Image (spheres, grey):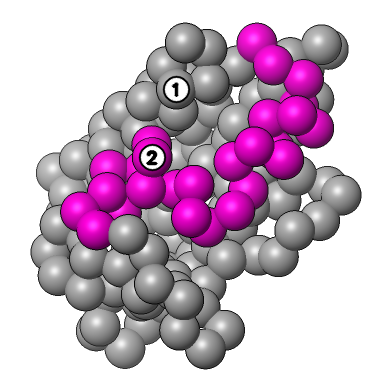
Amino acid sequence: MLPSRTISLAIPRNWLDLYETIWKPEFFPKWASGLSHAPLVAEGNGWKAKGPEGPVKIRFTGHNALGVMDHYIDNGFGKEVYVPMRVIANQEGAEVVITVFRQPLMSDEKFAHDVAWVTRDLQALYALMTS
């Protein structure tokens, strides 16, 4: 079992409206800094992107009625990293939830860095959705 950290952020928008706005893979580079280096390019059942450490392949959960936005990132080392993501109702607002799993052999510092990175990206999403 991998250690994990779940980060959540409340956004004052109807959850379904928020989900419908952000679920498309093409929207991720607007707030997910790891994908903001170039546009995503559709390839087979996934997408190619230029990440901060080089090219990555990403598979996204398809559109659904539950607010699930899970994605799987392959950074070229032969193993996909699962990133669970949800948009859930929080009364008249929404909660965006992302879980970061500490990968095998990952240092404490790298894991803390990844958690901080996801936190910053969620704050960028908040700013984008509330401005």
The residue drawn where x is 69% and y is 16% is 13
Residue 54 shows in this picture: yes
Q: Is residue 11 above or below residue 118?
A: above
Numbered circle sitting on residue 30 = 2
Query: Residue 83: where, in percent of width, then height?
Result: 50, 57
Q: Is residue 19 magenta?
A: yes
Q: Which residues are magenta?
A: 12-38
> In the structure shown, which secondary structural element does the residue marked by tag 2 occupy?
helix
The numbered mark at residue 128 is: 1
Which x, y percent locates residue 127?
42, 16
Q: Please give the count of numbered marks on the rendered protein.
A: 2
Seen at 42% across and 55% down, the residue is 101
Q: Earlier in the sequence, mark 1 or mark 2?
A: 2
Say what secondary structure mark 1 lies in. helix
Question: Circle 2: is it few (<14), some (14-19), or many (20+) Cα within 10 Å?
Answer: some
Inter-mark Cα distance, 1 to 2: 8 Å
Q: Residue at x 45, y 40 (%)?
A: 5
In the image, 52: left or right of 6?
left
Q: Amino acid at mark 1?
A: Leu
